[in-house]
């Protein structure tokens, strides 16, 4: 086979604690408005809003952290610290009871959001892509296999900016739990090994300024350090 130009390198994330073992990223799904404390106004449990980020929006981040350029085209970049689920076994119409058998592991991610663009799109009833799916919009820690990770239903999740705690919550506040998210997504798409799910963010989202140092984590999963250039 020959190509008209060199194919883009595959997006991969190292597996935590393993030498030279990588998780190949297929797609990145995001679940919006999934923590009760942020969405009390929504009341009843309605199907979640789903968005996607391209696989190459993922920035793998090792324990030393990463420094990113401040994204273009926004003056209101928001942080959303999230538990990331890494799918190891695909499927369609996966029952909730079987959903966790499809998980390879977990990571900590930032669902970076150009909130000003999102508000502008939402106000016109238009899609969120420019707000959610931009380059380097998904920094993610190395993936920790599920065998070495606690069950995902009751884990503290937090984010510090410049050493001040800004976001704080627990995965037990999720409106749609991890297994329910997998089951629901698999009714809309055929899930594939390599899919990532960004599972929503707890209370406290807000703006990131140039020069900020972010450190977020999920209990038992990992710590994510991301700095933005001044
Ligand atoms: Mn999010």
Image (tube, rainbow, N blue to C red):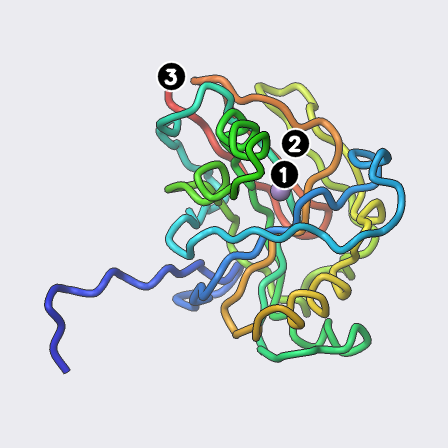
Q: Specify few, some or many for label 2: CA neighbours under 10 Å numbering under 14, 14-19, or 20 or more.
A: many
CA gap between label 1 and label 3 equals 21 Å
Q: Where is residue 178 in the image (x, y as percent from the top left)?
A: 74, 60
Q: Foreground residue, 90 or 140?
A: 90
Mark 3 = which residue? 230
Question: What numbered label is drawn on residue 81?
Answer: 1
Q: Work out whether 199 lies above or below 202.
A: below
Q: Foreground residue, 209 or 63?
A: 209
Locate residue 138 relative to residue 41 in the image: left or right: left
Q: Position of residue 113 (x, y in %)?
A: 53, 34
Q: Work out whether 25 lies above or below 127.
A: below
Identify the residue at horizontal 62%, vertical 68% (top origin): 188
Q: Is residue 227 visible?
A: yes
Q: Foreground residue, 94 or 156?
A: 94
Of the two numbered discs 2 and 1 in the rendering, the one whose residue sits closer to the viewer: 1
Residue closest to the far front: 124
Q: Work out whether 217 lies above or below 52.
A: above
* The quarter of the picture showing ligand 1: top right
Q: Work out whether 9 lies above or below 186.
A: above
Sequence-first disc among 1 and 3: 1
Q: Specify few, some or many for label 1: CA neighbours under 10 Å numbering under 14, 14-19, or 20 or more.
A: many
Locate residue 137 relative to residue 175 in the image: left or right: left
Identify the residue at horizontal 85%, vertical 34% (top origin): 41
CA gap between label 2 and label 3 equals 20 Å
Contact check, label 2 and label 1, Cβ < 8 Å: yes
Asked if the residue at label 2 sits under 8 Å from ligand 1, the reply is no
Residue closest to the far right: 44
CA gap between label 2 and label 1 equals 6 Å
Mark 2 = which residue? 159
Q: Can residue 22 be seen in this view?
A: no
SS at mark 2?
strand
The image quadrant that residue 189 belongs to is: bottom right
């Amino acid at each position: 086979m020959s190509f008209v130009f060199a194919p883009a390198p595959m997006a991969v994330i190292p597996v935590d604690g393993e030498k030279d073992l990588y998780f190949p990223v297929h797609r990145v799904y995001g679940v919006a408005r999934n923590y009760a404390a942020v969405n009390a106004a929504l009341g009843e449990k309605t199907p979640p809003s789903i968005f996607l980020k391209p696989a190459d929006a993922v920035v793998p981040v090792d324990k030393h952290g990463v420094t990113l350029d401040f994204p273009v085209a926004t003056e209101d970049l928001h942080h959303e610290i999230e538990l990331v689920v890494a799918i190891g076994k695909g499927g369609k119409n996966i029952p909730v009871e079987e959903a966790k058998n499809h998980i390879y592991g977990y990571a900590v991610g930032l669902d970076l959001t150009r909130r000003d663009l999102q508000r502008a799109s939402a106000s016109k009833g238009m899609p969120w892509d420019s707000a959610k799916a931009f380059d380097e919009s998904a920094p993610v820690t190395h993936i920790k296999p599920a065998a070495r990770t606690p069950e995902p239903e009751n884990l503290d999740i937090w984010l510090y900016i410049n050493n001040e705690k800004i976001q704080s919550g627990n995965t037990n506040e999720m409106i749609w739990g991890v297994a329910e998210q997998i089951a629901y997504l698999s009714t809309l798409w055929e899930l594939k090994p390599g899919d990532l799910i960004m599972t929503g963010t707890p209370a406290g989202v807000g703006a990131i300024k140039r020069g900020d140092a972010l450190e977020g984590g999920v209990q038992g999963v990992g710590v994510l350090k991301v700095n933005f250039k001044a």
